[in-house]
Image: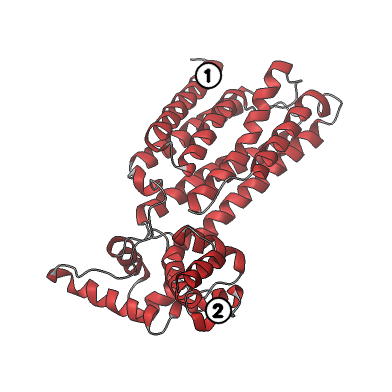
Amino acid sequence: MTLAATELAFRAASVALLLVLAASLLHDFRSVLAARLGAAFVLSSVAHAVSYSLDVTSRIPLWHAPLVALSTGTIVVFWLFTRALFDDEFRLRWWHGLIWALVVAFSFAGCVWIAPSGHVRFSVTVVNLIVLGFIALAVGQMIASWPADLVERRRRVRVFIVCAIALYGGLNAVLQIAVVGQHVGAVAETLNAGVLACTVAAIVYAMMRVDGADLFPAAAEPAPPTIFSQPAADDSADQKLIDALMRLMADERIYRQESITIGVLATRLKIPEYRLRRLINQRLGYRNFNVFLNNHRIEEAKAALADPAQAEVPVITIAMDAGFQSLGPFNRAFKAVTGVTPTEYRRLNAASL
């Protein structure tokens, strides 16, 4: 088999796997934002698999430019996908679409105008720096939110997916900047196509090994109750830990502490961090540590807002007393739990007296 045929086979395999993965996501989780963005990322990766080349010495045909532009826009979709995957409260905004459109437009202009006018290095370098920037944002989001994830299997798979894509995309961006203007040859192109096919296959395999409901929660279920029901007798050790955890929450109100982490709670309870994660997830029903904390904070805030004696206390004071660091996150978390804003909640309670 020639190198050209081998490269074509690798690209075809990547496209086939990506299409199967996109169809699976849309079929099983089309109502979940993270899954829809995942499918969009997978489909835009098809453009990358079809059009990407390390060799940028030759003029790009006009018909090929839209594919290259869409391939560049894939990195923005990847960033949005990781935002939704790691942040259960993430919502798409109009400016997210604007960022994607600007990146795609610049890439298209680079293909049809900037590079042909003699500025190939400038065009390629800027595009790949944009790619590296969005990869850094995605990895940063993963690092920042990873400790709060309580679903162990989901934590491992999410890290693998992001790291695999970031490694492949980052290396390609650096290589393309390094070899711009040089002819890399068929061997390098075939190897690149093979690495892409292996990366896609590894991600598909990893996603098949985890329950899709763990990776993409079916959505906006009501917050779990903060009071735990009595378990079976053989779970008495876990029950004692749950009771101790609830005492920290109810009596010491440890959730008020700034930058409270699951590691701090595990230390206070004198148990390994992984065991506390499992208890909060499997026994209390929480998937995210921040949601667990915020529900306790919101319960305190609800009591304060409904208290006639605190009718003149500013909402921001109540929010910060409960452990929130600013008003915006408090308002969003409060409305997600109660369906109304803190001010509306206070007014409704005052009217019922």
39 shown above or below 47: below
Decide: marks 1, 2 in contact (CB < 8 A)? Answer: no
Left or right of residue 6: residue 278: left
- Residue 98 pos. (x, y %): 69, 39
Q: Residues within 10 Å of mark 1 (few under 14, many from 20)?
A: some
Amino acid identity at mark 1: Leu
Disc 2 secondary structure class: loop
Residue at position x 47%, y 34% from top? 200
Which badge, 1 or 2, comes first in the chain's sequence?
A: 1
Circle 2 residue: 311
Give the residue pinned by disc 1.
8
In the rendered view, tell whether residue 283 sits above or below residue 120: below
Cα–Cα gap, marks 1 and 2: 70 Å
Residue at point 55% right, 79% down? 311
Q: Is residue 350 visible?
A: yes
- Left or right side of 40 for 208: left
Q: Residue furthest left?
A: 233
> Taking 153 as reference, is 303 left or right?
right
Residue at 84 percent of width and 31 percent of height: 119
Q: Quadrant of the C terminus?
A: bottom left
Looking at this view, is 163 or 66 the one in front? 66
State the residue in front, 174 or 344: 344
Q: Would you call the spot at circle 2 few (<14 residues within 10 Å), some (14-19), or many (20 or more)?
A: some
